[in-house]
């Protein structure tokens, strides 16, 4: 695995197809040969092949938009000059025209629709190539293939972004929160006539500077609740309409995302959109992360309860400091919140289980931590999770997911004799009341300002026993990979939304 990054760095300048990257990695021994992955690669290659002609179509489309915008600009200059020349009479005439065209009287002139000036509306963007929806079990290579697709597409497209789905939704709710804080006039001045305009406008900003069109890759996609289903349908519909290609990785096929009886009226339009604009690829196979960790025992990260001194020695090796040579830090989270870390070293932090999983914290807090350190040391003992600590187990899984996505290691002592036993005390199935209580803080904070009707259904409503079992397997698989030599090496195709925009 440690040899994978240099291979990608070399080949991304030479090869342009995911199959080339994959073949080189297999030949070098950085990856295992996988029949399901081999079957999927031609579809990834096909998408990359379609990008150059699509870009040409988008360039032609951009020229048409530019002509309309230039004509609009010239008309606005003349209109402003005319209104200034006629003074009060011109202002009265303007308001009468607003009434005739059913336009709000406080609408700024530069926010008026094209038809007001006799201009054509912007033509629809060329239909983008069909995206991909990769789904399968833990460790089967979904994210790996998406990363390779992202690398090759990034060589062709002016705008590419890859983001973990949970991270994306936190950003979306933050954007909606900012939209709610604007006055009606401020929204009109910015051309924001719908809450989702603010989100899509931000996401498409990179495209606006170029020809339009781009690639947006969602990793670990899921439908958390009714609000997410509605939002994703609106956001993806607008993005695809503007020419964005959207790809996903998920553990479930789209039809199975509704296992928890999400209302059909909220879910079916979104499901139809996925089926219409994405090709489904089912990856079957073994957990390659687990196999890799068995062969590559790079660095021991998990210790028995009595091995406190070994953990402190690892801290010294990691930071070059003694265990008590620490400082405090305050890291921004979201919505004006902050995370207070009391024991911070050189690119590492010491945190208790109370701070990490027992307090009212969530993915946004874990992101704040992961953005500031490369290693988390848990100072007390992580228990074997049981049914009465299911909430803590879920937060721990979220912590692992965020750390894995950001290449942050977790060093801990645990009561589990083996990592496979960490969740062995949790009985099958999900206690929705317990989960609702545990996620209330995170869910309500994230969805502040979206609307009470959306908040009526919490994330827990859709969290099934099958979801839980999958999350346990994925968490254990990722903990094992964190111990491998190559885990901390970011290959060039592992990019986040923030670094791509």
Image: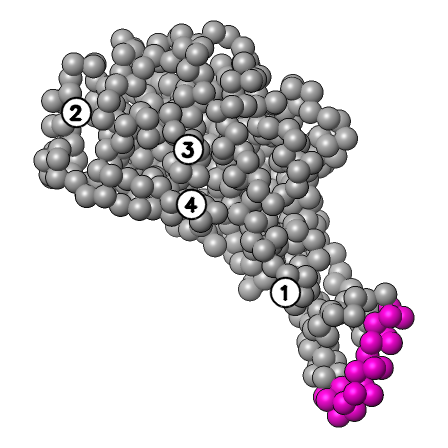
State the CA–CA distance, disc 2 to disc 4. Answer: 31 Å
Specify the segment rendered in magenta. Answer: 81-101
Mark 4 lies on residue: 337
- Look at discs 1 and 2 and give the one toward the viewer: 1
| Residue count near mark 2 (Cα–Cα under 10 Å), binned few <14, some 14–19, many ≥20 | many
Residue 328 rendering spot, x and y as whole percentages: 23, 43
Mark 2 lies on residue: 311
Mark 1 lies on residue: 186
Q: Secondary structure at mark 4?
A: loop
- Tell me if label 4 and label 3 are in contact, CB under 8 Å: no
Q: Earlier in the sequence, mark 1 or mark 2?
A: 1
| Residue count near mark 3 (Cα–Cα under 10 Å), binned few <14, some 14–19, many ≥20 | some
Q: Secondary structure at mark 2?
A: helix
Q: Secondary structure at mark 1?
A: helix
In front: 154, or 359? 359
State the CA–CA distance, disc 4 to disc 1. Answer: 25 Å
Q: Main secondary structure of the magenta part?
A: helix
């Amino acid at each position: 695995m440690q040899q994978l990054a240099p291979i990608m760095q070399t080949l991304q300048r030479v090869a342009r197809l995911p199959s080339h990257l994959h073949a080189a990695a297999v030949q070098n021994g950085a990856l295992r040969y996988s029949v399901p992955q081999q079957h999927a690669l031609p579809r990834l290659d096909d998408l990359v092949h379609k990008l150059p002609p699509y870009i040409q179509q988008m360039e032609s489309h951009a020229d048409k938009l530019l002509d309309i915008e230039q004509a609009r600009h010239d008309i606005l200059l003349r209109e402003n000059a005319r209104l200034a020349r006629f003074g009060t009479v011109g202002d009265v005439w303007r308001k009468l025209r607003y009434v005739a065209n059913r336009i709000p009287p406080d609408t700024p002139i530069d926010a008026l629709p094209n038809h007001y000036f006799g201009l054509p509306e912007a033509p629809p963007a060329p239909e983008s190539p069909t995206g991909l929806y990769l789904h399968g079990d833990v460790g089967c290579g979904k994210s790996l293939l998406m990363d390779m697709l992202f690398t090759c597409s990034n060589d062709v497209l002016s705008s590419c972004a890859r983001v973990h789905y949970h991270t994306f939704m936190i950003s979306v709710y933050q954007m909606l929160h900012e939209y709610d804080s604007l006055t009606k006039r401020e929204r009109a001045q910015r051309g924001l006539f719908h809450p989702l305009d603010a989100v899509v406008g931000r996401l498409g900003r990179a495209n606006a500077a170029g020809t339009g069109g781009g690639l947006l890759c969602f990793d670990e996609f899921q439908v958390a609740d009714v609000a997410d289903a509605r939002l994703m349908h609106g956001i993806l519909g607008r993005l695809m309409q503007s020419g964005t290609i959207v790809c996903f990785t998920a553990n479930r096929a789209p039809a199975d995302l509704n296992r928890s009886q999400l209302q059909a009226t909220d879910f079916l339009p979104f499901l139809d959109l996925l089926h219409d604009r994405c090709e489904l690829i089912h990856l079957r196979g073994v957990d390659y992360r687990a196999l890799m960790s068995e062969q590559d025992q790079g660095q021991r990260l998990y210790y028995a309860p009595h091995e406190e001194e070994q953990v402190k020695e690892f801290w010294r090796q990691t930071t070059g400091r003694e265990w008590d040579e620490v400082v405090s830090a305050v890291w921004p989270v979201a919505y004006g919140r902050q995370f207070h870390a009391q024991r911070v070293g050189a690119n590492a932090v010491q945190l208790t289980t109370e701070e990490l999983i027992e307090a009212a914290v969530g993915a946004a807090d874990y992101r704040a931590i992961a953005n500031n350190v490369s290693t988390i040391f848990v100072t007390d003992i992580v228990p074997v999770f049981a049914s009465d600590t299911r909430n803590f187990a879920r937060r721990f899984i979220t912590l692992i997911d965020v750390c894995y996505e950001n290449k942050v290691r977790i060093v801990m002592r645990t009561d589990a004799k083996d990592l496979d036993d960490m969740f062995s005390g949790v009985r099958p199935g999900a206690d929705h009341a317990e989960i609702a209580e545990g996620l209330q803080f995170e869910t309500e904070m994230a969805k502040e300002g979206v609307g009470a009707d959306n908040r009526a259904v919490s994330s827990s409503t859709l969290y099934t026993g099958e979801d839980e079992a999958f999350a346990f397997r994925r968490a254990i698989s990722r903990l094992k990979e964190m111990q491998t030599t190559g885990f901390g090496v970011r290959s060039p195709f592992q990019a986040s939304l923030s670094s791509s925009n």
